[in-house]
Image (tube, rainbow, N blue to C red):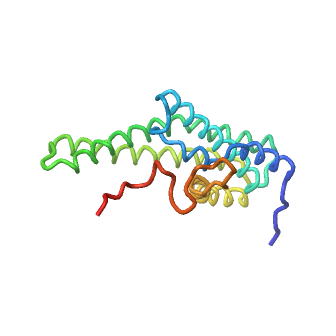
Amino acid sequence: MKTRPRGNAVWSAGLMALFLTVSLPALADQTPDHLGSTEESQALREEAERRVRTYRAVMLARHLDLDEKSALALNATMSSYDEARREIQGNLAENMRLLRAAARETEPDEQEVKAAIERVLEARSRLEALRQQEARELLEGLSPARQARLMIFFREFPREVGRLMHEPRPRGPNDDRPKDGPPAHRRKAVPPH
């Protein structure tokens, strides 16, 4: 069994350094509660998405042992699906908010709940169909070994991003976070006894 070479390590390291100039954990700690406006929240979300896409390009190159041009081409194809995915996920999130609100009510409107459930199920089906279409397009022209690695990448990359989003940031000299707990904006108020 052949092992794959490491690829263009300099290119991968350069992109990784670019990505890590502001880490995902730093972006994750910024919540809408801390932002002055919806525009700032949207700008932060767009910056996080841009950084995830950059990280995705680096990881694609590394996992599939691609040159810069091939990795960017695959990443561009994936990016073309991002907008459709964002729209579906937005619809899904909105309907989940409706269901959460209904779950808190003592007697929610049955028709509204059923309609929201149908929209959630439809959004999930659309997301899965989009993922399958994207995978089929990306697999075209790849060797069997790269096809296998791409399918593994699809499974592992979201987990890796999630891990990065929840990793604690290193403490700096001006860091006002408590040493033994979550940031102040995430602490639950405990009523006095």
> Which quadrant would the C terminus be assigned to in this image?
bottom left
Query: Residue 118 appears in which quarter of the rendering?
Result: top left
Query: Residue 74 appears in which quarter of the rendering?
Result: top right
Q: Is residue 91 left or right of residue 183?
A: left
Q: Nearer the viewer, residue 25 or 140?
A: 25
Q: Position of residue 128 (x, y in %)?
A: 46, 49
- Which residue is drawn at the image coordinates 68% and 51% (left, top)? 172
> Which quadrant would the N terminus be assigned to in this image?
bottom right
Q: Position of residue 39 (x, y in %)?
A: 50, 27
Q: Nearer the viewer, residue 137 or 75?
A: 75
Q: Nearer the viewer, residue 101 or 135?
A: 101
Q: Residue furthest front?
A: 193
Q: Position of residue 121 (x, y in %)?
A: 33, 48
Q: Nearer the viewer, residue 72 or 37?
A: 37
- Which residue is drawn at the image coordinates 71% and 52% (left, top)? 59
Please say if 168 is above or below 111.
Answer: below
Q: Is residue 109 left or right of residue 45?
A: left
Q: Residue furthest left?
A: 107
Please say if 137 is above or below 168.
Answer: above
Q: How many marks?
A: 0
Q: Is residue 27 left or right of residue 14?
A: left
- Which residue is drawn at the image coordinates 46% and 35% (left, top)? 87
Q: Position of residue 130 (x, y in %)?
A: 50, 44
- Which residue is drawn at the image coordinates 68% and 59% (left, top)? 149
